[in-house]
Image (cartoon, rainbow, N blue to C red):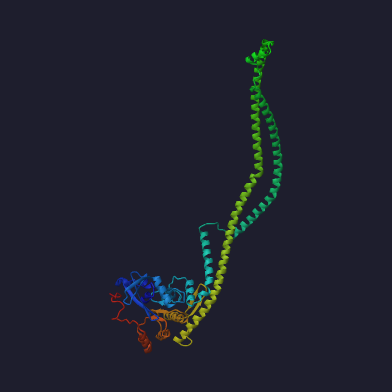
Protein backbone atom coordinates (compact mmCIF):
# COMPACT_ATOMS: atom_id res chain seq x y z
CA UNK A 1 0.00 0.00 0.00
CA UNK A 2 2.94 2.35 0.71
CA UNK A 3 4.23 1.75 -2.84
CA UNK A 4 0.83 2.70 -4.24
CA UNK A 5 0.97 5.81 -2.01
CA UNK A 6 4.36 6.70 -3.52
CA UNK A 7 2.77 6.43 -6.97
CA UNK A 8 0.11 9.00 -6.04
CA UNK A 9 -2.62 6.65 -4.79
CA UNK A 10 -5.03 7.52 -1.97
CA UNK A 11 -5.95 4.05 -0.73
CA UNK A 12 -3.28 4.08 1.97
CA UNK A 13 -4.94 7.10 3.60
CA UNK A 14 -8.47 5.80 2.97
CA UNK A 15 -7.97 2.16 4.02
CA UNK A 16 -5.01 2.23 6.42
CA UNK A 17 -6.01 4.90 8.88
CA UNK A 18 -4.58 2.77 11.69
CA UNK A 19 -1.03 3.65 10.62
CA UNK A 20 -1.09 7.41 11.35
CA UNK A 21 -3.39 6.69 14.29
CA UNK A 22 -0.68 4.66 16.04
CA UNK A 23 2.44 6.29 14.59
CA UNK A 24 1.27 9.85 14.22
CA UNK A 25 1.58 11.75 10.97
CA UNK A 26 4.79 11.04 9.12
CA UNK A 27 6.48 11.19 5.70
CA UNK A 28 7.53 8.56 3.17
CA UNK A 29 10.61 9.39 1.12
CA UNK A 30 11.24 7.81 -2.29
CA UNK A 31 13.11 8.37 -5.53
CA UNK A 32 12.85 7.51 -9.23
CA UNK A 33 15.56 6.93 -11.79
CA UNK A 34 14.91 7.94 -15.40
CA UNK A 35 17.69 8.01 -18.01
CA UNK A 36 20.33 7.68 -15.25
CA UNK A 37 18.95 10.74 -13.43
CA UNK A 38 17.51 10.38 -9.94
CA UNK A 39 14.51 12.40 -8.73
CA UNK A 40 13.68 12.67 -5.02
CA UNK A 41 10.28 13.17 -3.41
CA UNK A 42 8.43 12.73 -0.15
CA UNK A 43 4.77 12.58 0.74
CA UNK A 44 3.16 12.84 4.17
CA UNK A 45 0.04 11.48 5.81
CA UNK A 46 -1.08 14.81 7.27
CA UNK A 47 -1.43 16.57 3.92
CA UNK A 48 -1.37 13.83 1.27
CA UNK A 49 -2.57 16.23 -1.47
CA UNK A 50 0.96 17.69 -1.51
CA UNK A 51 4.12 15.92 -2.68
CA UNK A 52 7.45 17.60 -2.02
CA UNK A 53 10.22 17.62 -4.57
CA UNK A 54 13.48 17.16 -2.63
CA UNK A 55 17.23 17.11 -2.93
CA UNK A 56 19.33 14.00 -2.36
CA UNK A 57 19.04 14.50 1.42
CA UNK A 58 15.24 14.67 1.14
CA UNK A 59 15.20 18.29 2.09
CA UNK A 60 12.15 19.99 0.63
CA UNK A 61 12.73 22.10 -2.49
CA UNK A 62 9.19 22.86 -3.58
CA UNK A 63 5.67 21.53 -3.06
CA UNK A 64 3.70 19.90 -5.85
CA UNK A 65 -0.05 19.37 -5.98
CA UNK A 66 -0.79 15.66 -6.22
CA UNK A 67 -2.22 16.25 -9.72
CA UNK A 68 1.02 17.89 -10.87
CA UNK A 69 3.02 15.07 -9.36
CA UNK A 70 1.02 12.31 -11.10
CA UNK A 71 1.21 14.31 -14.34
CA UNK A 72 4.99 14.28 -13.97
CA UNK A 73 4.90 10.51 -13.42
CA UNK A 74 2.82 10.12 -16.58
CA UNK A 75 5.32 12.15 -18.62
CA UNK A 76 8.23 10.12 -17.31
CA UNK A 77 6.67 6.65 -17.58
CA UNK A 78 4.36 6.86 -20.60
CA UNK A 79 4.90 10.16 -22.47
CA UNK A 80 3.13 8.96 -25.62
CA UNK A 81 0.10 7.31 -24.06
CA UNK A 82 -2.09 10.33 -23.37
CA UNK A 83 -3.67 8.67 -20.32
CA UNK A 84 -3.58 9.96 -16.76
CA UNK A 85 -1.14 8.08 -14.58
CA UNK A 86 -3.63 6.98 -11.92
CA UNK A 87 -6.23 5.97 -14.51
CA UNK A 88 -3.59 3.80 -16.14
CA UNK A 89 -2.12 2.27 -12.99
CA UNK A 90 -5.27 2.07 -10.84
CA UNK A 91 -6.67 -1.27 -12.03
CA UNK A 92 -3.24 -2.96 -11.90
CA UNK A 93 -2.22 -1.83 -8.43
CA UNK A 94 -3.90 -4.76 -6.68
CA UNK A 95 -3.30 -4.18 -2.99
CA UNK A 96 -5.48 -5.45 -0.17
CA UNK A 97 -8.16 -4.26 0.68
CA UNK A 98 -8.75 -2.31 -2.54
CA UNK A 99 -11.81 -3.15 -4.65
CA UNK A 100 -9.73 -4.34 -7.59
CA UNK A 101 -8.33 -7.25 -5.59
CA UNK A 102 -11.67 -8.27 -4.07
CA UNK A 103 -13.87 -8.14 -7.19
CA UNK A 104 -12.13 -10.84 -9.17
CA UNK A 105 -14.59 -10.81 -12.08
CA UNK A 106 -14.07 -7.09 -12.77
CA UNK A 107 -10.39 -6.78 -13.74
CA UNK A 108 -10.85 -3.43 -15.58
CA UNK A 109 -12.25 -1.65 -12.53
CA UNK A 110 -9.92 0.33 -10.29
CA UNK A 111 -12.80 0.90 -7.85
CA UNK A 112 -16.21 -0.73 -7.74
CA UNK A 113 -18.07 2.57 -8.23
CA UNK A 114 -16.29 3.33 -11.52
CA UNK A 115 -18.57 3.26 -14.55
CA UNK A 116 -18.06 0.32 -16.87
CA UNK A 117 -17.93 2.63 -19.87
CA UNK A 118 -15.06 4.59 -18.32
CA UNK A 119 -13.21 1.35 -17.59
CA UNK A 120 -13.55 0.19 -21.18
CA UNK A 121 -12.46 3.57 -22.57
CA UNK A 122 -9.40 3.55 -20.28
CA UNK A 123 -8.58 0.03 -21.46
CA UNK A 124 -8.76 1.18 -25.09
CA UNK A 125 -6.48 4.14 -24.30
CA UNK A 126 -4.00 1.78 -22.68
CA UNK A 127 -3.88 -0.12 -25.97
CA UNK A 128 -3.65 3.22 -27.85
CA UNK A 129 -6.88 2.49 -29.73
CA UNK A 130 -9.13 5.17 -28.28
CA UNK A 131 -8.06 7.76 -30.86
CA UNK A 132 -9.87 5.69 -33.50
CA UNK A 133 -13.22 6.44 -31.88
CA UNK A 134 -12.37 9.82 -30.33
CA UNK A 135 -14.25 11.82 -32.96
CA UNK A 136 -17.30 9.55 -32.66
CA UNK A 137 -17.11 9.81 -28.84
CA UNK A 138 -16.88 13.61 -29.03
CA UNK A 139 -19.84 13.78 -31.39
CA UNK A 140 -21.90 11.45 -29.20
CA UNK A 141 -21.02 13.41 -26.07
CA UNK A 142 -22.04 16.69 -27.69
CA UNK A 143 -25.40 15.25 -28.75
CA UNK A 144 -25.86 13.51 -25.40
CA UNK A 145 -25.18 16.77 -23.54
CA UNK A 146 -27.77 18.58 -25.67
CA UNK A 147 -30.27 15.79 -25.07
CA UNK A 148 -29.66 15.90 -21.30
CA UNK A 149 -30.05 19.69 -21.30
CA UNK A 150 -33.35 19.27 -23.16
CA UNK A 151 -34.61 16.72 -20.66
CA UNK A 152 -33.61 19.00 -17.80
CA UNK A 153 -35.56 21.86 -19.38
CA UNK A 154 -38.53 19.52 -19.71
CA UNK A 155 -38.22 18.62 -16.05
CA UNK A 156 -38.21 22.31 -15.12
CA UNK A 157 -41.36 22.85 -17.23
CA UNK A 158 -39.66 25.55 -19.31
CA UNK A 159 -41.96 24.60 -22.19
CA UNK A 160 -45.01 22.44 -22.81
CA UNK A 161 -44.19 18.75 -22.94
CA UNK A 162 -46.32 16.83 -25.42
CA UNK A 163 -46.38 13.31 -26.75
CA UNK A 164 -47.13 11.80 -30.15
CA UNK A 165 -50.91 11.92 -29.61
CA UNK A 166 -50.86 15.60 -28.61
CA UNK A 167 -48.61 16.34 -31.56
CA UNK A 168 -51.08 14.67 -33.93
CA UNK A 169 -54.01 16.54 -32.37
CA UNK A 170 -52.11 19.80 -32.67
CA UNK A 171 -51.40 19.13 -36.34
CA UNK A 172 -55.13 18.63 -36.98
CA UNK A 173 -55.93 21.84 -35.11
CA UNK A 174 -53.27 23.73 -37.08
CA UNK A 175 -54.75 22.48 -40.34
CA UNK A 176 -58.23 23.55 -39.23
CA UNK A 177 -56.92 27.02 -38.34
CA UNK A 178 -55.19 27.29 -41.73
CA UNK A 179 -58.41 26.30 -43.49
CA UNK A 180 -60.45 28.79 -41.49
CA UNK A 181 -57.98 31.58 -42.23
CA UNK A 182 -58.09 30.68 -45.93
CA UNK A 183 -61.90 30.85 -45.85
CA UNK A 184 -61.74 34.17 -44.04
CA UNK A 185 -59.35 35.48 -46.67
CA UNK A 186 -61.87 34.60 -49.38
CA UNK A 187 -64.81 35.97 -47.44
CA UNK A 188 -62.88 39.07 -46.51
CA UNK A 189 -62.84 40.21 -50.14
CA UNK A 190 -66.61 39.85 -50.31
CA UNK A 191 -66.96 41.52 -46.94
CA UNK A 192 -64.79 44.40 -48.06
CA UNK A 193 -66.91 44.95 -51.17
CA UNK A 194 -70.16 44.76 -49.24
CA UNK A 195 -69.02 47.04 -46.46
CA UNK A 196 -67.65 49.52 -49.02
CA UNK A 197 -70.97 49.59 -50.81
CA UNK A 198 -72.89 50.17 -47.60
CA UNK A 199 -70.32 52.63 -46.29
CA UNK A 200 -70.31 54.57 -49.57
CA UNK A 201 -74.10 54.98 -49.46
CA UNK A 202 -74.06 56.09 -45.85
CA UNK A 203 -71.14 58.46 -46.38
CA UNK A 204 -72.84 59.93 -49.45
CA UNK A 205 -76.00 60.68 -47.48
CA UNK A 206 -73.98 62.22 -44.68
CA UNK A 207 -71.99 64.30 -47.14
CA UNK A 208 -75.16 65.60 -48.77
CA UNK A 209 -76.63 66.50 -45.39
CA UNK A 210 -73.42 68.25 -44.45
CA UNK A 211 -73.39 70.17 -47.74
CA UNK A 212 -76.92 71.48 -47.16
CA UNK A 213 -76.01 72.55 -43.66
CA UNK A 214 -72.89 74.31 -44.88
CA UNK A 215 -74.93 76.24 -47.46
CA UNK A 216 -77.48 77.21 -44.84
CA UNK A 217 -74.67 78.19 -42.48
CA UNK A 218 -73.14 80.43 -45.17
CA UNK A 219 -76.50 82.16 -45.79
CA UNK A 220 -77.07 82.80 -42.09
CA UNK A 221 -73.55 84.11 -41.60
CA UNK A 222 -74.10 86.52 -44.57
CA UNK A 223 -77.36 87.80 -43.02
CA UNK A 224 -75.58 88.19 -39.68
CA UNK A 225 -72.90 90.34 -41.27
CA UNK A 226 -75.50 92.66 -42.85
CA UNK A 227 -77.41 93.05 -39.58
CA UNK A 228 -74.24 93.79 -37.69
CA UNK A 229 -73.35 96.36 -40.36
CA UNK A 230 -76.78 98.08 -40.06
CA UNK A 231 -76.52 98.17 -36.31
CA UNK A 232 -73.08 99.77 -36.45
CA UNK A 233 -74.08 102.52 -38.95
CA UNK A 234 -75.84 105.89 -37.65
CA UNK A 235 -77.64 107.86 -40.51
CA UNK A 236 -79.59 110.42 -38.38
CA UNK A 237 -79.09 114.25 -38.85
CA UNK A 238 -77.46 115.71 -35.77
CA UNK A 239 -77.97 119.37 -34.48
CA UNK A 240 -74.60 120.55 -35.82
CA UNK A 241 -75.58 119.21 -39.21
CA UNK A 242 -78.90 121.27 -39.00
CA UNK A 243 -76.95 124.58 -38.61
CA UNK A 244 -74.73 123.77 -41.57
CA UNK A 245 -77.78 122.95 -43.64
CA UNK A 246 -79.36 126.43 -42.84
CA UNK A 247 -76.10 128.07 -43.80
CA UNK A 248 -76.12 126.55 -47.25
CA UNK A 249 -79.88 126.68 -47.76
CA UNK A 250 -81.22 129.79 -45.99
CA UNK A 251 -84.79 129.21 -47.14
CA UNK A 252 -85.04 125.62 -45.82
CA UNK A 253 -87.78 124.84 -43.31
CA UNK A 254 -85.68 123.58 -40.38
CA UNK A 255 -88.71 122.90 -38.21
CA UNK A 256 -90.21 120.62 -40.75
CA UNK A 257 -86.91 118.80 -41.19
CA UNK A 258 -86.60 118.42 -37.43
CA UNK A 259 -90.05 116.87 -37.22
CA UNK A 260 -89.13 114.46 -40.05
CA UNK A 261 -85.84 113.62 -38.34
CA UNK A 262 -87.63 112.95 -35.08
CA UNK A 263 -89.94 110.56 -36.92
CA UNK A 264 -86.99 108.79 -38.48
CA UNK A 265 -85.32 108.39 -35.12
CA UNK A 266 -88.41 106.71 -33.73
CA UNK A 267 -88.46 104.38 -36.71
CA UNK A 268 -84.73 103.72 -36.30
CA UNK A 269 -85.16 102.74 -32.69
CA UNK A 270 -87.84 100.24 -33.68
CA UNK A 271 -85.68 98.86 -36.50
CA UNK A 272 -82.65 98.50 -34.23
CA UNK A 273 -84.62 96.41 -31.76
CA UNK A 274 -85.86 94.20 -34.59
CA UNK A 275 -82.30 93.85 -35.93
CA UNK A 276 -80.97 92.87 -32.52
CA UNK A 277 -83.73 90.29 -32.14
CA UNK A 278 -82.95 88.93 -35.62
CA UNK A 279 -79.22 88.75 -34.76
CA UNK A 280 -79.93 86.71 -31.64
CA UNK A 281 -82.11 84.26 -33.61
CA UNK A 282 -79.51 83.91 -36.35
CA UNK A 283 -76.76 83.21 -33.79
CA UNK A 284 -78.86 80.45 -32.29
CA UNK A 285 -79.45 78.97 -35.75
CA UNK A 286 -75.73 79.17 -36.59
CA UNK A 287 -74.84 77.38 -33.33
CA UNK A 288 -77.39 74.66 -34.02
CA UNK A 289 -76.11 74.14 -37.56
CA UNK A 290 -72.49 73.93 -36.39
CA UNK A 291 -73.46 71.29 -33.82
CA UNK A 292 -75.22 69.34 -36.56
CA UNK A 293 -72.12 69.56 -38.76
CA UNK A 294 -69.95 68.26 -35.87
CA UNK A 295 -72.36 65.34 -35.40
CA UNK A 296 -72.18 64.51 -39.10
CA UNK A 297 -68.37 64.66 -39.00
CA UNK A 298 -68.36 62.20 -36.05
CA UNK A 299 -70.67 59.85 -37.94
CA UNK A 300 -68.42 59.98 -41.00
CA UNK A 301 -65.38 59.15 -38.81
CA UNK A 302 -67.19 56.20 -37.21
CA UNK A 303 -68.26 54.85 -40.58
CA UNK A 304 -64.72 55.02 -41.88
CA UNK A 305 -63.36 53.40 -38.70
CA UNK A 306 -65.85 50.54 -38.90
CA UNK A 307 -64.90 50.03 -42.50
CA UNK A 308 -61.15 49.94 -41.79
CA UNK A 309 -61.39 47.87 -38.53
CA UNK A 310 -64.20 45.32 -38.48
CA UNK A 311 -63.97 44.46 -34.75
CA UNK A 312 -65.37 40.92 -34.76
CA UNK A 313 -63.19 39.89 -37.67
CA UNK A 314 -60.05 41.34 -36.12
CA UNK A 315 -60.72 39.64 -32.79
CA UNK A 316 -61.23 36.27 -34.48
CA UNK A 317 -58.05 36.60 -36.53
CA UNK A 318 -56.11 37.58 -33.40
CA UNK A 319 -57.41 34.58 -31.42
CA UNK A 320 -56.67 32.21 -34.27
CA UNK A 321 -53.15 33.62 -34.61
CA UNK A 322 -52.46 33.22 -30.88
CA UNK A 323 -53.77 29.65 -30.91
CA UNK A 324 -51.78 28.80 -34.04
CA UNK A 325 -48.56 30.18 -32.50
CA UNK A 326 -49.12 28.21 -29.29
CA UNK A 327 -49.76 24.93 -31.11
CA UNK A 328 -46.95 25.50 -33.59
CA UNK A 329 -44.47 26.25 -30.80
CA UNK A 330 -45.44 23.06 -28.93
CA UNK A 331 -45.12 20.97 -32.09
CA UNK A 332 -41.82 22.59 -33.04
CA UNK A 333 -40.47 21.69 -29.59
CA UNK A 334 -41.69 18.12 -30.05
CA UNK A 335 -40.04 17.93 -33.49
CA UNK A 336 -36.77 19.18 -31.96
CA UNK A 337 -37.01 16.47 -29.30
CA UNK A 338 -37.63 13.81 -31.95
CA UNK A 339 -34.67 15.17 -33.94
CA UNK A 340 -32.45 15.08 -30.84
CA UNK A 341 -33.50 11.51 -30.07
CA UNK A 342 -32.85 10.53 -33.66
CA UNK A 343 -29.41 12.20 -33.66
CA UNK A 344 -28.65 10.49 -30.33
CA UNK A 345 -29.62 7.06 -31.67
CA UNK A 346 -27.57 7.51 -34.85
CA UNK A 347 -24.52 8.78 -32.97
CA UNK A 348 -24.81 5.98 -30.40
CA UNK A 349 -25.18 3.33 -33.10
CA UNK A 350 -22.26 4.74 -35.10
CA UNK A 351 -20.03 4.87 -32.02
CA UNK A 352 -21.11 1.40 -30.92
CA UNK A 353 -20.35 -0.17 -34.28
CA UNK A 354 -16.81 1.23 -34.47
CA UNK A 355 -16.14 0.61 -30.79
CA UNK A 356 -17.36 -2.99 -30.86
CA UNK A 357 -15.08 -3.83 -33.77
CA UNK A 358 -12.07 -2.52 -31.82
CA UNK A 359 -13.14 -4.21 -28.56
CA UNK A 360 -13.65 -7.53 -30.31
CA UNK A 361 -10.12 -7.29 -31.69
CA UNK A 362 -8.68 -6.32 -28.28
CA UNK A 363 -10.56 -9.12 -26.53
CA UNK A 364 -9.15 -11.57 -29.03
CA UNK A 365 -5.58 -10.34 -28.51
CA UNK A 366 -5.87 -10.34 -24.71
CA UNK A 367 -7.45 -13.80 -24.60
CA UNK A 368 -4.77 -15.19 -26.89
CA UNK A 369 -2.03 -13.76 -24.64
CA UNK A 370 -3.78 -14.99 -21.46
CA UNK A 371 -3.96 -18.45 -22.95
CA UNK A 372 -0.29 -18.27 -23.90
CA UNK A 373 0.76 -17.23 -20.38
CA UNK A 374 -1.60 -19.82 -18.84
CA UNK A 375 0.00 -22.62 -20.83
CA UNK A 376 3.43 -21.31 -19.89
CA UNK A 377 2.47 -21.41 -16.19
CA UNK A 378 0.21 -24.49 -16.04
CA UNK A 379 1.24 -26.45 -19.11
CA UNK A 380 -0.33 -27.15 -22.52
CA UNK A 381 -4.15 -27.35 -22.65
CA UNK A 382 -4.60 -25.39 -19.43
CA UNK A 383 -7.91 -23.61 -18.96
CA UNK A 384 -7.76 -19.84 -19.04
CA UNK A 385 -10.24 -17.04 -18.35
CA UNK A 386 -11.96 -15.28 -21.25
CA UNK A 387 -12.48 -11.54 -21.53
CA UNK A 388 -15.54 -10.38 -23.48
CA UNK A 389 -16.09 -6.68 -24.17
CA UNK A 390 -18.81 -4.70 -25.86
CA UNK A 391 -19.59 -1.00 -26.06
CA UNK A 392 -20.75 -0.51 -22.45
CA UNK A 393 -20.17 -3.84 -20.73
CA UNK A 394 -17.63 -6.56 -20.25
CA UNK A 395 -17.28 -9.92 -18.54
CA UNK A 396 -14.35 -11.95 -17.29
CA UNK A 397 -15.39 -15.58 -17.43
CA UNK A 398 -13.32 -17.70 -15.04
CA UNK A 399 -14.91 -20.97 -16.16
CA UNK A 400 -16.25 -23.77 -13.96
CA UNK A 401 -13.49 -23.54 -11.38
CA UNK A 402 -14.86 -20.90 -8.98
CA UNK A 403 -12.29 -21.43 -6.25
CA UNK A 404 -10.65 -18.41 -4.63
CA UNK A 405 -7.16 -19.47 -5.73
CA UNK A 406 -8.22 -19.83 -9.37
CA UNK A 407 -10.03 -16.50 -9.29
CA UNK A 408 -6.93 -14.69 -8.00
CA UNK A 409 -4.65 -16.58 -10.38
CA UNK A 410 -6.85 -15.48 -13.28
CA UNK A 411 -6.37 -11.84 -12.23
CA UNK A 412 -2.61 -12.35 -12.29
CA UNK A 413 -2.85 -13.97 -15.74
CA UNK A 414 -4.89 -11.04 -17.00
CA UNK A 415 -2.46 -8.44 -15.64
CA UNK A 416 0.58 -10.19 -17.10
CA UNK A 417 -1.14 -10.40 -20.51
CA UNK A 418 -1.90 -6.65 -20.42
CA UNK A 419 1.67 -5.94 -19.33
CA UNK A 420 2.92 -7.82 -22.40
CA UNK A 421 0.55 -6.11 -24.85
CA UNK A 422 0.61 -2.48 -23.73
CA UNK A 423 2.80 0.36 -22.49
CA UNK A 424 1.66 -0.31 -18.91
CA UNK A 425 4.96 0.18 -17.01
CA UNK A 426 4.02 -1.08 -13.54
CA UNK A 427 2.28 -3.97 -11.76
CA UNK A 428 1.65 -4.13 -8.02
CA UNK A 429 0.54 -7.56 -6.76
CA UNK A 430 -0.14 -7.99 -3.07
CA UNK A 431 0.29 -11.22 -1.08
CA UNK A 432 -3.45 -12.20 -0.96
CA UNK A 433 -3.37 -12.80 -4.72
CA UNK A 434 -1.08 -15.81 -4.14
CA UNK A 435 -2.37 -17.21 -0.85
CA UNK A 436 -4.65 -19.88 -2.32
CA UNK A 437 -2.78 -20.44 -5.56
CA UNK A 438 -0.80 -23.63 -6.19
CA UNK A 439 2.92 -23.27 -5.48
CA UNK A 440 3.83 -24.37 -9.00
CA UNK A 441 1.56 -21.70 -10.45
CA UNK A 442 3.09 -18.97 -8.25
CA UNK A 443 6.53 -20.12 -9.36
CA UNK A 444 5.35 -19.84 -12.96
CA UNK A 445 4.11 -16.32 -12.36
CA UNK A 446 7.49 -15.32 -10.93
CA UNK A 447 9.18 -16.65 -14.05
CA UNK A 448 6.82 -14.56 -16.14
CA UNK A 449 7.64 -11.49 -14.06
CA UNK A 450 11.31 -11.88 -14.89
CA UNK A 451 10.58 -11.50 -18.61
CA UNK A 452 9.94 -7.77 -18.16
CA UNK A 453 13.35 -6.16 -17.96
CA UNK A 454 12.18 -2.59 -18.65
CA UNK A 455 9.06 -2.61 -16.51
CA UNK A 456 8.52 -2.58 -12.75
CA UNK A 457 6.67 -5.32 -10.88
CA UNK A 458 6.16 -4.99 -7.15
CA UNK A 459 5.00 -8.10 -5.36
CA UNK A 460 4.91 -9.53 -1.83
CA UNK A 461 5.55 -13.18 -1.03
CA UNK A 462 6.20 -15.19 2.11
CA UNK A 463 7.50 -18.71 2.72
CA UNK A 464 9.40 -18.47 -0.54
CA UNK A 465 11.15 -21.77 0.02
CA UNK A 466 8.06 -23.69 -1.07
CA UNK A 467 8.45 -22.36 -4.61
CA UNK A 468 11.74 -24.17 -5.21
CA UNK A 469 15.39 -23.22 -5.03
CA UNK A 470 15.58 -21.64 -8.46
CA UNK A 471 12.67 -19.32 -7.62
CA UNK A 472 14.24 -18.48 -4.25
CA UNK A 473 17.42 -17.41 -6.05
CA UNK A 474 15.40 -15.28 -8.48
CA UNK A 475 13.51 -13.61 -5.63
CA UNK A 476 16.58 -12.94 -3.50
CA UNK A 477 18.41 -11.47 -6.48
CA UNK A 478 15.58 -9.01 -6.98
CA UNK A 479 14.53 -8.50 -3.38
CA UNK A 480 14.28 -4.86 -2.27
CA UNK A 481 12.85 -5.32 1.20
CA UNK A 482 12.69 -8.38 3.44
CA UNK A 483 10.65 -8.30 6.65
CA UNK A 484 10.62 -10.68 9.60
CA UNK A 485 10.01 -10.60 13.33
CA UNK A 486 13.13 -8.56 13.89
CA UNK A 487 13.07 -6.43 10.76
CA UNK A 488 9.59 -4.89 10.70
CA UNK A 489 8.11 -2.21 8.48
CA UNK A 490 7.27 0.06 11.42
CA UNK A 491 9.06 0.38 14.73
CA UNK A 492 5.80 0.00 16.59
CA UNK A 493 3.59 -3.08 16.46
CA UNK A 494 -0.14 -2.67 17.21
CA UNK A 495 -1.71 -5.82 15.76
CA UNK A 496 -1.68 -7.51 19.19
CA UNK A 497 -1.72 -6.40 22.83
- Give the left or right position of residue 439, taking residue 277 as reference: left
Residue 40 figure quarter:
bottom left
- Name the residue: 58% across, 66% down: 342
Q: Specify the farthest residue to the bottom.
A: 469
Quadrant position of residue 428:
bottom left
Question: Up-down: is 295 above or below 256?
Answer: below
Residue 256 in percent (x, y) is at: 68, 11
Q: In the image, what residue occupies the spot 70% across and 34% down?
A: 211
User: Taking 186 as reference, is 240 above or below it?
Assistant: above
Horizontal arrangement in the rendering, residue 158 relative to residue 257 (left or right) = left
Front residue of 323 and 66: 66
* 160 on left or right of 222: left
Q: Camera-side residue: 377 or 302?
A: 302
Residue 257 rendering spot, x and y as whole percentages: 68, 12
- Is residue 275 or residue 238 the one in the foreground? 238
Residue 102, visible in the rendered structure = no
Quarter of the image for the C terminus: give it: bottom left
Quarter of the figure that contains the N terminus: bottom left
Asked if 126 appears above or below 250 in the picture, the reply is below
Q: Is residue 132 above or below residue 333?
A: below
Out of 361 and 258, give the one closest to the viewer.
Answer: 258
Q: Is residue 478 visible?
A: yes
Q: How many marks do you count on the picture?
A: 0
The image shows residue 478 at horizontal and vertical percentages of 37, 84
Give x and y (percent) for residue 146: 53, 64
Amino acid sequence: MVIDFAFGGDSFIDDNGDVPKHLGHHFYSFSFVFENARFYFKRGTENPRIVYECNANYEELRPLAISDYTEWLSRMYTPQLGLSFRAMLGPYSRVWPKDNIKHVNKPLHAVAAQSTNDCINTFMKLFDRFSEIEEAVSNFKRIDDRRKAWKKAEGLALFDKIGRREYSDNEKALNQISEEVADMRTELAKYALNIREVADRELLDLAQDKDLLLKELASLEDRLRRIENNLSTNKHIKSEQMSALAEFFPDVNLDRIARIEEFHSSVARLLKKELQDSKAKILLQIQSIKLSILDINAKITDRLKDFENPTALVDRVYNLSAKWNQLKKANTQYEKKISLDSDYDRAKTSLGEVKNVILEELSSRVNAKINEVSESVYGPGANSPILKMSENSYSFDIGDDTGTGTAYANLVLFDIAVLYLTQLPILIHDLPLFKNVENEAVAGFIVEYTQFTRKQIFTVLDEIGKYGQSIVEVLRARCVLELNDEDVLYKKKWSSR
